[in-house]
Image (cartoon, rainbow, N blue to C red):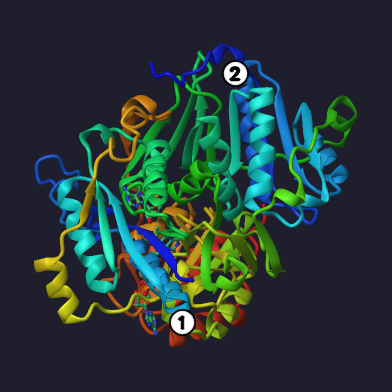
Amino acid sequence: MSDDAVDVGEYEDVWVFVEEHGGEVMPVSWELLAEAAKLTETTGDDLVALAIGEGLETVADEALARGADRVLVADDPVFEPYRADPYGEQFRAMVEERKPSIVLIGGTHTGRDFAGRVAVPAHAGLTADVTELDVDDEGILQARRPAFGGDVLATILCEEHRPQMATIRPGVFEAAAPDPERVADGDVVSVDVVVDEADAISEVLEREVGDTADITEAERIVAVGRGVEGDLEPARRLAEALDAELAASRAAVDEGWVDGARQVGQTGKTVRPDLYVAVGISGAIQHVEGMNKSGTVVAINDDPNAPIFEHADYGIVGDLFEVCPALADRLEGEPIQEVTG
Amino acid sequence: MTWTIAVGVKQVPDADEVGIDPDTGRLDRASAPAVMNGPDRHALEAALTIRDQVGGEVIAMTMGPPNATSVLEEAVAMGSDDAVLISDRAFAGSDTWPTSLTLARAAEALEADVVVCGEETTDSSTGQVPPGIAAHNGWAQLTYAEAVDARPEEGRLAARRDVEGGYELVAAELPVVVAVAFGEFDPRPAPLHRKIYGENDFEPTVWDAEALGIEDEVGLDVSPTSVGRMETVDPVERKGEVVDEVDGLLEPIAEVRA
Ligand SMILES: Cc1cc2nc3c(=O)[nH]c(=O)nc-3n(C[C@H](O)[C@H](O)[C@H](O)COP(=O)(O)OP(=O)(O)OC[C@H]3O[C@@H](n4cnc5c(N)ncnc54)[C@H](O)[C@@H]3O)c2cc1C
Ligand SMILES: Nc1ncnc2c1ncn2[C@@H]1O[C@H](COP(=O)(O)O)[C@@H](O)[C@H]1O
């Protein structure tokens, strides 16, 4: 046992970080709250939501409605917009004072940015990119994550240090519907703000938040890759014909053709639509990891050897600039009959 | 005023060359050739860009076994002025906590103004090391950086950060740790004379845990996390049917929508 190991018995409760920017909550926060409720059912701990920002009354109430027993709120202008140093400092102070056993954070850019600023000084265990969660009889978190390009699921444990922290991939868990009746039974606790603007070592000069689409709930998705070469029209039309959401590979996002909120994959979102149409996507493992829970997968690619065909139920080898419009024509021409009865 | 810019580069198994073990049918990573982590090439390019903006020195650093020297040679070929190999048996079993401590102490020893890292490694893919370095040293950090703007007159570095659904421009005081968004900063090709220098004449500085004063703070013992079970994931079964005409897709699509 190492010197810094702690008395794990002193630590209790499961915390979920509620990520909000300017009043808008990232959907992964509610996914985590629903999943964490299953953990607290096993451990008997309280489920605690934690929010950092400015003007958080509505967010706090929603966290109660979504399943939290208690909400800790650090409300101050210093936290808006988000910066790693004030967030990390505040979160760390709360962790060290209140000693949670488990802390779950959405694996968004923001969550992954500050989680280490809490875990390092607290000497906590921090597992990245978790896709499955469980807890054993002794309250040890079983944080599972894909390793070796997704061929292996590794269980990461943190036995002697606390808290047990994890960042969780967005879209893998289902959010629960809010129940407004829960709000009255919960507590909202306002915590001391320990950071001061004068100590900040970073400054946000500009911030532009555009598309914050949530593709994780979509029933049908048309996803574009580098193959579309900046021309989204064919895929857009197909998406419209299918009443589908537009998504993208990381390459298409990096090129600036599609907003990052719509990226599918290891460093994007996990989606599980009934229908996933991959247009001009090669099928790299990091992409496939985010879409292989989809129902039916259709691939359109002009390279017969593209790996995406191994991950598809139906494939068409052909030029997307011809296949997409042709398919859209057929879909528009023949409205699909709803099956009744 | 010029800046000292340290870059973290890691040696990883070449993801494109990982073969299947014929006996077990599993991925055989041990036989894959070791290469520089792809995202670290972008980090190097970002470091060279900062050097172009302010002047100074780029120093590549890696924590790894002695044969990780080859990634340092590559970094020197691409334009790093110098490189440090941080190597010690005591590092075995380190998770991201002691790894980032080690790199944090190395950055201090180099008197770095800026530490540039990649977004993630392709073998452990945590992305935790760069914020970990910043946290150990109490430095500022700029992750998911898409563009950098050195502002020596302000003693700050500004970066355009990719945030969900948009971007932000953030200025941070030095010293600062930058993690570059993968795919940004197209790596420049290494000129032939630098390649030859890197391979034949260049020798990295070598530090062990004691040189950094962290011999009791690394390895398995101080790592809060450990790996428990490893389960192979059964690949998702797909039909893999190739159709010749778009009409062949209408029925499966109709079924999904039903
Ligand atoms: C740490 C790390 C994390 C990553 N995370 C992600 C992630 O979350 N999501 C993700 O998607 N990727 C991720 N990647 C990147 C991934 O490895 C691939 O580089 C990326 O998915 C490739 O995108 P693509 O398929 O659009 O582009 P390419 O691989 O360039 O494929 C383009 C495809 O389009 C086809 N094509 C071209 N023209 C046409 C045409 N006219 N008609 C039909 N087909 C055409 C080509 O045959 C090709 O197959 C990550 C990589 C790393 C290292
Ligand atoms: N052993 C190492 N030596 C040098 N740099 C590293 C090492 N491990 C991680 N890094 C840096 O940290 C980044 C993120 O790595 P990781 O947190 O392991 O995903 C990498 O892209 C490197 O720039």
- How far across and how far down the image is residue A297, in percent? 44, 61
What residue occupies the far front of the structure in this picture? B1
Q: Secondary structure at mark 2?
A: helix
Whether ligand 1 has any atom under 8 Å from the Cβ at mark 1 is answered as: yes
Q: Residues within 10 Å of mark 2 (few under 14, many from 20)?
A: few
The residue identified by callout 2 is A42
- Mark carried by residue A228: 1
Say which amino acid is labelled 1: Val
Q: Is residue B18 left or right of residue A282?
A: left
Q: Chain of mark 1?
A: A
The answer to whether residue B258 shows anywhere in this view is no
- Callout 2 and callout 1 share a chain: yes
- How far across and how far down the image is residue A334, in percent? 60, 78
* Quadrant that contains the N terminus of chain A: top left
Say which amino acid is labelled 2: Thr
- How far across and how far down the image is residue A256, in percent? 54, 77
Q: Residues within 10 Å of mark 1 (few under 14, many from 20)?
A: some
- Which residue is depicted at the point 51% across and 32% down? A133
Give the camera-side residue of A184 and A57: A57
Looking at the picture, does residue A162 appear above or below residue B76?
above
